[in-house]
Image (cartoon, rainbow, N blue to C red):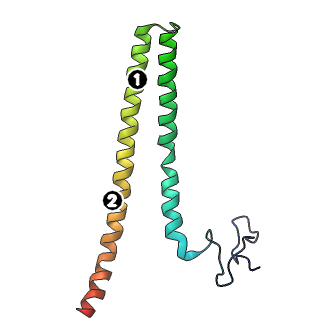
Amino acid sequence: MPRCIATKPDGSPCERIVSASRKYCYAHDPSKAAARSRTATKAGRSKPHRELHETRTQLQDLVDKILAKKIDRGAAAVAGQLLNVKLRALEIERRIKESEEFEARLDEIERRLPEVSTRSSRWG
């Protein structure tokens, strides 16, 4: 069976099996670099999800402690307000990242625009 011809970062050969018509596996195929980058970008967004889950867990713990009368209601109210501030900060962070990604995509489109208009003018 044919194997990927690429070398891993540690210098060892890639051992993934590829189809007979291919030289590279998905992880090393230069034509798949953009797709890998998009996937990595999506993976990078996972941190806010983890923080949201942690915040939800903290809120539930807070509610449980209030109901079990293990925490003062005033202290719980302040903690709840602070968790709400944290949630708003996470939302702002998400919007900023989304905006930055959109700007990067728009810059790439604008960079390619002269190429596209030059090609289309040859045919039109």
Local SS, label 1: helix
Identified by mark 1, the residue type is Leu
Q: Quadrant of residue 19?
A: bottom right
Distance in Å between CA atoms under marks 1 and 2: 31 Å
| The N terminus - image quarter | bottom right
> How many numbered marks are there?
2
Residue at 75% x, 72% y is: 13
Q: Is residue 122 above or below residue 101?
A: below
Residue at 33% x, 52% y is: 99
Q: Residues within 10 Å of mark 2 (few under 14, many from 20)?
A: few
Q: Quadrant of residue 103?
A: bottom left
How far across and down, in percent of the image, does residue 94 sit?
Answer: 39, 45
Marks 1 and 2: CB-CB under 8 Å? no
Identified by mark 2, the residue type is Glu
Return the residue at label 1. 82
Q: Quadrant of residue 75?
A: top left
| The C terminus - image quarter | bottom left
Q: Is residue 77 above or below residue 44?
A: above
Residue at 48% x, 57% y is: 41
How far across and down, in percent of the image, does residue 91 sit?
Answer: 37, 39
- 95 left or right, relative to 124: right
Local SS, label 2: helix
Q: On residue 63, which mark appears?
A: none
- 54 left or right, relative to 19: left
Who comes first in sequence, dot 1 or dot 2?
A: 1
Q: Residues within 10 Å of mark 1 (few under 14, many from 20)?
A: few
Residue at 47% x, 35% y is: 52
Return the residue at label 2. 103
Q: Nearer the viewer, residue 43 or 107?
A: 43
How far across and down, in percent of the image, does residue 106 sit?
Answer: 32, 64
Q: Is residue 109 above or below residue 49?
A: below
How far across and down, in percent of the image, does residue 16 sit?
Answer: 72, 70
